[in-house]
Image (cartoon, rainbow, N blue to C red):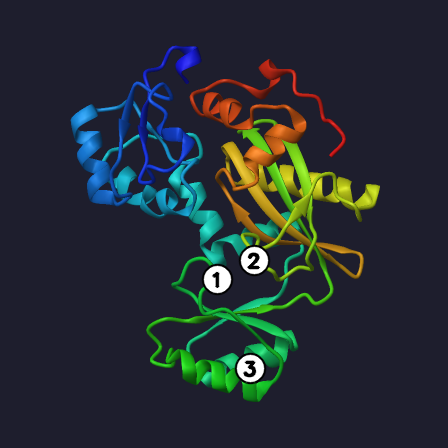
Amino acid sequence: LNEIGYKTIMYNCNPETVSTDFDISDRLYFEPLTFEHVMNVIDFEKPDGVLIQFGGQTPLNIATQLKEHGVHIIGTDSSAIDLAEDRQKFGEILNQLKIPAPQWGTAYSIEEALSIAEKINYPVLVRPSYVLGGRGMEIVYDNDDLKTYVAKAALVSGEHPILIDDFLENAYEFDVDALCDGEQVHVAGIMQHIEEAGIHSGDSACVLPPYELSVDHKNTIKQYTAALALELKTVGLINIQFAIQNNQVSVLEVNPRASRTIPFVSKVKDVPLAKIASQLAVGEKLKNYNLEQQQN
């Protein structure tokens, strides 16, 4: 953003990282990444807008609050972020675009959980709906295990639902990073996980280019990526996780933000993805960057 004439403010709660270099931005704040602390800085600096795509999940969680307090979110809008985060709304988008995903359900009691698991078929992935980063997640193979899980999680009160997903056994998992300006989509890289689907992406290793991906499946992944990025009105970066099982490509998760793989893909492809994404967020267009669709 400095390159195209903006003064920039970096807000970072982690003093260990390279983004704390003194010349990375015009101003640098070390503060906790909470709504109140961010608003203090915004009230003081009065920026034209805030870019929330580069801080992982935490900034996305406070995006709606910031918008409600009159803060201009640059790039992907908080309403689009909500569409990707809300299981029900996202399920409707996938149905509308005719994109397959593992079957899922939401349960508030043991009875509902058993009914959903029977419909989906075991094994299922179960987790509380209010935790981040896969905490409390288990793979369950039968009714007894599911009853034990629900009792142990003490979620039967009905206050917090349990999410139940079809667990895809022996599936290949792929991560896709892409750029979108709201009109065009550039697939930056398709990575394949070394481990089978089901290992959290933070604990798995991935390789680029993928080692087990047919041309047809690659084209399908690109097609689904473009459709989802445009439907979610993405401006900047988007990360999508796919699984391939029994010759079918399914969407596991969509994150309308920069992922941990962006530096990796940028180095392999020699394309400054974060730089381009930040410039797209303030109105630049993909066509101005001469990005060819390289072999992924």
Circle 2: element type: loop
Residue 39, image x, y percentages: 21, 37
Of 5 and 201, which appears nearest the observer? 201
- Structural distance between the alpha carbons of marks 3 and 1: 23 Å
Horizontal relation, residue 221 to residue 109: left or right = right
Residue 115's disc is 3
Q: Is residue 223 above or below residue 104?
A: above
Q: Which residue corresponds to mark 1?
A: 134
The amino acid type found where label 2 is placed reads His
Query: Cα distance, mark 3 to mark 2?
Result: 27 Å
Among numbered discs 2 and 1, the one appearing first in the sequence = 1
Q: Earlier in the sequence, mark 3 or mark 2?
A: 3
Q: Is residue 198 visible?
A: yes
Q: Secondary structure at mark 3?
A: helix
Give the residue at x 60% y 38%. Answer: 177
Q: Which residue is mark 2?
A: 200
Helix, strand, or loop for circle 1? loop
Front residue of this view, candidates 55 and 168 = 55
Q: On the rendered structure, is 145 left or right of 83?
A: right
Residue 100: horizontal and vertical position, in percent?
67, 56
Dot 2, crowdedness within 10 Å: few (<14), some or many (≥20)?
few
- Residue 28, given in percent of the width and then of the height, sits at 28, 27
- The image's mark for residue 30 is none
Amino acid type at image mark 3: Ser
Please report the residue visible at 57 percent of the width from the left and 27 percent of the height from the top.
183
Name the residue rendered at 45%, 55% in the picture.
86
